[in-house]
Image: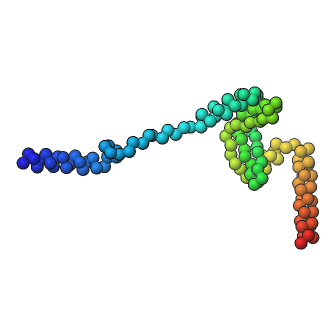
Amino acid sequence: MKETMMNREKVAKLQTQAYKIGGKGTAHRKKVVHRIATAHDKKLQFSLKKLGVNNISGIEAANTFTNQGTVIYFNNTKVQSSLAANTFTITGHAETKQLTEMLPSFLKQLGTDNLTSLRRLAEALKQISRYRKDRGSQMI
């Protein structure tokens, strides 16, 4: 009777161990360490320091225009430059926005003088596109 009781205990113990992962005979794997971007940022800052960049103060926001009609908008930026190395850096939180979404804020920032020159530029672009369209239809 003692033997059957011990066998039942062994079977119960083995059944509970069936759900465990690892143990004797399993491959040992090293835990993957996920590195955050701070190491990359430190290397970048060190490289910029080598170039001799200086902070440019007074810039609150920066916009970068792309060919796809979007604007990369940097708010609360840190702008640095090195004229000797012909290097400019813009760091901060970047958002990608559509040009039409950003246009009202651009118009507020432009003065009346700049607004008239912007209108002239838009008219010139229209004339160029008409010329290309007319020339393209004549070639066919």
Residue placed at 64% from the left, 32% from the top?
Answer: 43
Specify whether 35 is left or right of 29.
Answer: right
Q: How is the image coloured?
A: rainbow
Residues 110 and 61: in front is 61
State whether residue 131 appears in this view.
yes
Q: Is residue 80 above or below residue 124?
A: above
Residues 51 and 54: in front is 51
- Which quadrant holds residue 139? bottom right
State whether residue 57 appears in this view.
no
- The location of residue 53, given as percent across then percent down, is 75, 29
Count of number-bearing discs: 0
Residue placed at 72% from the left, 44% from the top?
Answer: 73
- Which quadrant holds residue 86? top right
Q: Looking at this rendering, what residue extends furthest in the left direction? A: 1
Which image quadrant: the C terminus?
bottom right
Residue placed at 76% from the left, 45% from the top?
Answer: 64
- The location of residue 128, given as percent across then percent down, is 91, 59
Residue placed at 90% from the left, 52% from the top?
Answer: 121
- The location of residue 133, given as percent across then percent down, is 89, 65
Specify whether 33 is left or right of 108.
Answer: left
- Which quadrant holds residue 80? top right
- The location of residue 48, given as percent across then percent down, is 71, 31
Q: Looking at this rendering, what residue extends furthest in the bottom direction? A: 140
